[in-house]
């Protein structure tokens, strides 16, 4: 310990417990600000191409009023900076971004209000930041190992947060009989025995083979090393037959066959995902369900592999536009992959 640190330590020892608590909070805030190296990250991740036209013919164009390096594209003439189009683009409180992401992925699944209180932002900002981050950070599955379990997870269709809905259902009620119906949102799940997990929101209604093909699962399966297993779901059987994959099935009432062909691994994850969506979060809008399944995957990955999600929040140069187009994407999803009408568009996005 240096002489300066020893002098500070002696002075701190003379403080009361209340003053030490206040000093602790102050120091924690300073540490968060020091670790939030926004300026460093923006210099580290220099753009390799124009975010507008993807041209690599770009050059520096001086500093803007905030002393941030800007660039100009020689192909389309657009001006941009290091973070243009990313999740942090146009964020005003950049000094709180690191703390927010740490809380988001610490595994506690803090509510919007609790996160806002801890970070020191409004609940509306907390909600927007959550979905900007979850829209930006999307880690793709490249391949699976050995036996791959396939199943579909059901969630009730929800328009939580949308105003003036005709004949709204009571919370927790599906509005129809239990089981597969037109108000059942399907999340297709694929998982191997070493915890590689893929989740995709594919349809409102009965799962179809073309929905599975739309997830791009076929490029992640190696016919020589992977064996697919599921119950005798007709859509899954149709998909595996079309692709020519080896597929071992079992009767759902028996839960397994030969002790190794089962979906117990994926069911355990599905139960925890349902608990998060239905119990911890008290239900989520179908509009944001893909983001929440992505949140679950990223937190699960953090348990096995240390991830720097702060760094990853800078990488996706289309995150800003993807976030602001979420209502259009939701409308297209309902029109193409459900029998439900798109009603009551939001007035502000």
Image (spheres, grey):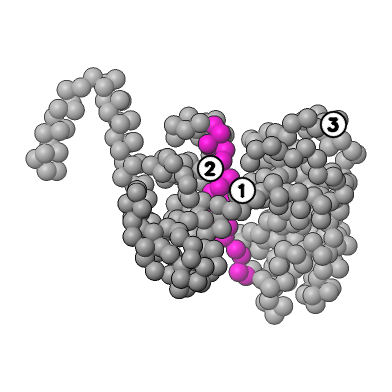
**Label ID, residue 129:** 2
Would you place residue 44 above or below residue 75 in this image? above
> Upstream in the sequence, badge 1 or badge 2?
2
Residue 154 visible in the picture: no
> Which residue sits at x=56%, y=34%?
124
Is disc 1 surrounded by few (<14), some (14 to 19) or many (20+) residues within 10 Å?
Answer: few
On the image, the x and y values in percent for residue 167 come to 86, 30
Could you tell me which secondary element the residue under label 3 belongs to?
loop
Give above or below for 163 relative to 33. Answer: above
x, y (%) of residue 151?
76, 57
Task: Check if residue 155 falls in the magenta segment.
Answer: no
Per the image, the residue denoted by label 1 is 324
Q: Secondary structure at mark 1?
A: helix
Answer few, some or many: residues within 10 Å of disc 3's Cα (few below 14, many 20 plus, some between 14 and 19): few
Name the spot of residue 59 as percent of width and height, x first: 39, 69
Give the labeled residue for mark 3: 166
Nearest the camera: 152 or 321? 321
Along the horizontal axis of the image, is 193 left or right of 174?
left
Left or right of residue 318: residue 251: right
The residue sitting at the right extreme is 177
| Residue at left offset 66%, top offset 71% | 220
In the depicted structure, whether residue 93 falls above or below residue 62: above
The residue located at (79%, 61%) in the rendering is: 211
Return the x and y of residue 256 as percentages of the image width and height.
79, 59
The reply to whether the magenta stretch includes residue 130 is: yes
Q: Single out the residue that lies furthest toward the front.
A: 77
What residue range appears in magenta?
123-143
Res. 157 image quadrant: top right
Q: Picture quarter containing residue 190?
A: bottom right
Q: Nearer the viewer, mark 1 or mark 2?
A: 1
């Amino acid at each position: 310990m240096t002489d300066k640190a020893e002098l500070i330590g002696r002075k701190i020892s003379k403080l009361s417990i209340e003053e030490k608590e206040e000093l602790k909070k102050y120091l924690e805030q300073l540490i968060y600000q020091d670790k939030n190296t926004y300026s460093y990250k923006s210099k580290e991740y220099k753009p390799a191409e124009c975010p507008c036209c993807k041209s690599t013919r770009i050059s520096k164009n001086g500093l803007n009023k905030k002393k941030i390096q800007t660039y100009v594209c020689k192909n389309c003439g657009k001006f941009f900076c290091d973070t243009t189009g990313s999740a942090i683009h146009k964020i005003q409180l950049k000094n709180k971004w690191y703390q927010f992401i740490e809380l988001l992925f610490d595994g506690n699944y803090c509510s919007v209000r609790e996160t806002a209180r801890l970070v020191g932002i409004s609940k509306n900002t907390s909600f927007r930041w959550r979905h900007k981050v979850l829209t930006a950070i999307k880690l793709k599955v490249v391949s699976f190992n050995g036996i791959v379990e396939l199943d579909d997870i059901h969630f009730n269709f929800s328009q939580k947060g949308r105003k003036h809905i005709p004949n709204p259902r009571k919370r927790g009620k599906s509005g129809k009989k239990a089981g597969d119906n037109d108000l059942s949102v399907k999340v297709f799940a694929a998982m191997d025995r070493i915890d590689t997990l893929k989740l995709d929101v594919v349809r409102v209604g009965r799962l179809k083979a073309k929905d599975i093909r739309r997830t791009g699962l076929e490029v992640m399966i190696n016919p020589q090393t992977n064996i697919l297993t599921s119950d005798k779901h007709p859509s899954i059987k149709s998909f595996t037959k079309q692709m020519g994959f080896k597929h071992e099935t079992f009767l759902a009432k028996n839960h397994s066959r030969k002790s190794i062909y089962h979906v117990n691994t994926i069911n355990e994850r599905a139960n925890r995902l349902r608990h998060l969506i239905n119990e911890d979060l008290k239900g989520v809008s179908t509009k944001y369900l893909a983001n929440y399944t992505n949140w679950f995957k990223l937190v699960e990955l953090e348990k096995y592999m240390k991830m720097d999600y702060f760094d990853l929040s800078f990488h996706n140069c289309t995150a800003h536009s993807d976030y602001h187009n979420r209502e259009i994407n939701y409308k297209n999803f309902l029109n193409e992959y459900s029998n439900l009408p798109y009603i009551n568009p939001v007035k502000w996005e």
